[in-house]
Amino acid sequence: MNNLNPYTLQSYFSDGSNVLFFESADYKNFHSNIQNIFKSYYIGLPKILKVTGKLAEIWLDFQRALVEFGRIAIVEYGSEWLLARIVRGERNKRREWKDLELCFLGDEDTEAFKPEEGRYVIFFWNSAGEPFSLANVEYKLKNIWETEYLISWDQRKSRKTLSIRFQRHPGPNDLKPMEESLAKGYLFAISPGKTANEIQEVKWFETRNSAERQQLWKDRDKYWSDVCFYLGIRHNPFSKEERQNNPEVQAGQVHFDNWENERLDCLVKGFLELQSKSWGKDTEVLIKYGSLEPCWIMKSQFLNHLDEEKVQQLLFSEKISNLNLNFSSGSKNTNNLTN
């Protein structure tokens, strides 16, 4: 990338034929790093505050697989709970699977198997069961990469430079003392006024924070904001000068609230189905998803919008189901959900 010049860059982008620029090793590393950073964000977004049963043993691997594949099965296998990806199968409107085949994670070389009915629960990462992907923001990432390059090129070209003008075109003897001093880390030039090629002028050129450079930074920040908005990465999408009052700021967070609520809803449905199984009935979960308030799932009950006092009660109780959580009218809601 550093060997490219702005004219080469322009030729790549003028007619849309920018394949060479975006097939560089630097861009591929950038793309891979961004993908890993976003995956890490999604994996850490749901925080288990308290969990009972065997779910605790597989939680982190479960969350990684859910982001990677979009849907993942927890399978009761003897006395263990194992994770498996879906090889094939279709789900109808009644959430029943047809022709389902699974493959245990880490055992990809073995043949797919048909799970025994009632011995598995399939979780979705989102309502469509699609895995995390950068495909929908690929063009925005390329915009960022192009802008980052232009910023870097502009910074290199605007470093402090020294211009020395001779009376005539300088020869080797004129330049040699300056080249030797420059190699030592400084530039020292002497013109006693009696040389045949006297130095006429010396000028310093300082770095300038031009309007063009400021615009490049604004463009880059806008592209990043767009990527984060599309991918549900919570941030303030409004720039400071556009932000006028709290309602506007809150309105900018509605999209992220809905994005997190959709994925929390998918987890809750999976937990409730897990608790309906004989082998998963003892699973109780106290979870906080992103910036949403904590919720509690236990024995086909879903209680959300927990305040700090209720969370502390749940955290320090030996068994969540032993708690008697009384809610007065007008306080937090308890929702009884069934599959």
Image (spheres, rainbow, N blue to C red):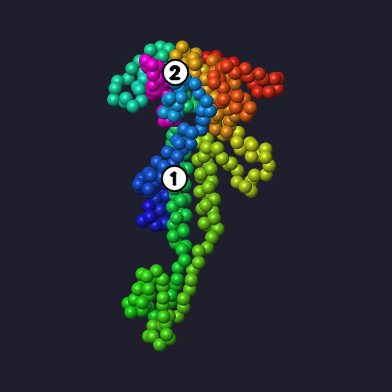
How many numbered marks appear?
2
Compared across the picture, whether 107 is left or right of 54 comes to: left
Residue hosting label 2: 121
Instruction: Please identify the dominant SS of the magenta region.
Output: strand
For the question of whether residue 83 can be seen, the reply is yes
Compared across the picture, whether 59 is left or right of 332 comes to: left
> Residue 293: x percent and y percent?
59, 29
Q: Name the amino acid type tagged 2.
A: Val
Compared across the picture, whether 330 is left or right of 4 comes to: right
The kind of secondary structure element at disc 1 is: helix
> Residue 283: x percent and y percent?
49, 18
Q: Is 94 inside the magenta-drawn segment?
A: no
> Residue 124: x percent and y percent?
47, 24
Q: Classify 10 Å Cα crowding around label 2: few (below 14), some (14-19), many (20 and above).
A: many
Residue span colored magenta: 64-86
Cβ atoms under marks 1 and 2 closer than 8 Å = no
- The residue lying at 57 percent from left, 16 percent from top is 322
Q: Name the amino acid type tagged 1.
A: Lys
Compared across the picture, whether 219 is left or right of 85 comes to: right
- The residue lying at 49 percent from left, 16 percent from top is 282
Q: Classify 10 Å Cα crowding around label 1: few (below 14), some (14-19), many (20 and above).
A: some
- The residue lying at 48 percent from left, 73 percent from top is 203
Disc on the earlier residue, 1 or 2 = 2
Taking depth in this image into account, of 42 and 223 the one nearest to the observer is 42
Q: Nearer the viewer, mark 1 or mark 2?
A: 2
Taking depth in this image into account, of 249 and 22 the one nearest to the observer is 249
The kind of secondary structure element at disc 2 is: strand
Decide: is 11 above or below 324.
below
Taking depth in this image into account, of 262 and 142 the one nearest to the observer is 262
Residue hosting label 1: 142
For the question of whether residue 100 can be seen, the reply is no
